[in-house]
Amino acid sequence: MITQITTSDKRFPLGPGAGSDAIHRDPVYSYAVTLLKDDNGHTGTGLAFTLGEGNDLVCKAAAFLAQSLKGRDIEELMADFGNWQRGVSNEQQFRWLGPHKGVVQLALASVTNACWDLWAKKRGVPLWKLLLDLSPEQLVATLDLSYLEDVLTAEQAVQILRTALPTRGEREGILQVGYPGYDTSIGWFNYSDETVKENVRRSVENGFTAMKLKVGDMDMNKDLRRTAIVREGAGDEATVMVDSNQQWSMPRALEFGERTRDLNLYWIEEPTHPDDILGHATLAKAYGPTKVAAGEHVPNRIIFKNYLQADALGICQVDAVRVAGVSEFIAVSLMCRKYEIPVVPHVGDMGQIHQHLVLFNHIGMDHEALMLEQIPHLKGKFKNPCVVENGLYHIPQEPGVSSDFL
């Protein structure tokens, strides 16, 4: 049973220019960490991601939400985890601070991810293997599907998973090959043009065929120049994406789409405010065939549902350290499977948890194995950092969700 619950505030300043974008010019990559210890010596580590200030508030909220876990057996808890998560997320006073968004939702992500880590470690398997070992009914029991019933019932979720079961063998080859990655660190916002050019050259040498540039400068001509630098350096066959991190008004976002048509962009990410679902729907129509990608700042499954209902997403970037952890990530992935929208997560965890989740999405849900963001800046902080070589993620083998720090 769970005998001890603690939280910790971990913050990691980055090198000059690293992690910068049009909105967040000086980020401090930070984690609100929940630690669960059981009477067998296992420790579950859960993460939520922030950029520094306020990380302590998430830790305090996580400590509050985790109180009811003390004395619980992890197997018994996870057998009906969806109901536990629904109850704790709707705590009648604390819910007012959300609901299901902001500090309280980040706190639930941290606690939820700790539960999944503890469960996988107790079973002695990596998260991706645990997820594949669960029956469709067992997996759906870990999900809170409330407010989704109009598009995804528990029965429909089970059926999606059952439908993918007979063809799993066709997709398990990825466990030998590795999962494709894309390079986000070629073009942080504060990098010079010369640095971007050199980073693109190095990325290509390292086997990446997909990469992403930060845009959103007040001078759009600068964005266009830098995007052309990436396209030229990566080559015509490379997959090139850009990310404005919510910087643009709708007129600016539409203008950028028009002015980059000859650069063959795969997606334009977070082109405007994340709450503007109808705005994203307008952009999705205007950008085609370039896709709208969003989800980094979408806090819960209900808003993702609305994005999908409005045809406002071409790529779903749900992040398990922003929504309510692994469980809500899977709920969103199930909806995306129904709507036939690819899931390419934002990796606030730097890919540690998401390398497991995309494997499950592909093998267990028949999502396309498209690619997974690679950001290496905190690689040296984890006991079992994700390994990316020749543009491919190696398959993690250690028990748990790969979130333990050194």
Image: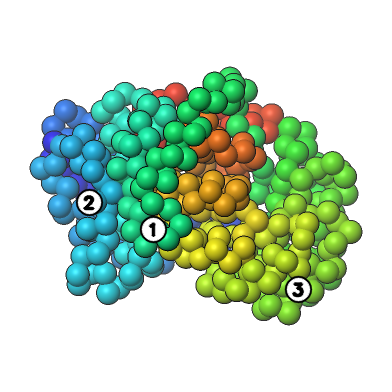
Disc 2: which residue = 84
Determine which residue is flagged by label 3.
Answer: 254
At 63% from the left edge and 74% from the top edge, which residue is drawn? Answer: 279
Query: What is the x, y in percent for residue 332?
Result: 47, 52
Image quadrant holding the N terminus, namely top left
The quarter of the displayed image where residue 294 is located: bottom right
Q: Is residue 11 visible?
A: no
Viewer-closest of 198 and 395: 395
In three-dimensional space, the C-alpha distance between marks 1 and 2, rounded to whole angstroms, equals 18 Å
Mark 3 or 1 closer to N-term?
1
- Residue under numbered circle 1: 149
Q: For the residues marked 3 and 1, what is the alpha-carbon distance in whole angstroms?
A: 34 Å
Residue at 70% over, 69% down = 283
User: Relative to residue 223, is residue 180 drawn left or right?
Assistant: left
Give residue 44's position: percent from left, percent from top. Answer: 28, 38
| Circle nearer the N terminus (3, 2) | 2
**Residue nearer the viewer, 113 or 5:** 113
Element at label 3: helix
Helix, strand or loop at label 1? It is loop
Amino acid identity at mark 1: Glu
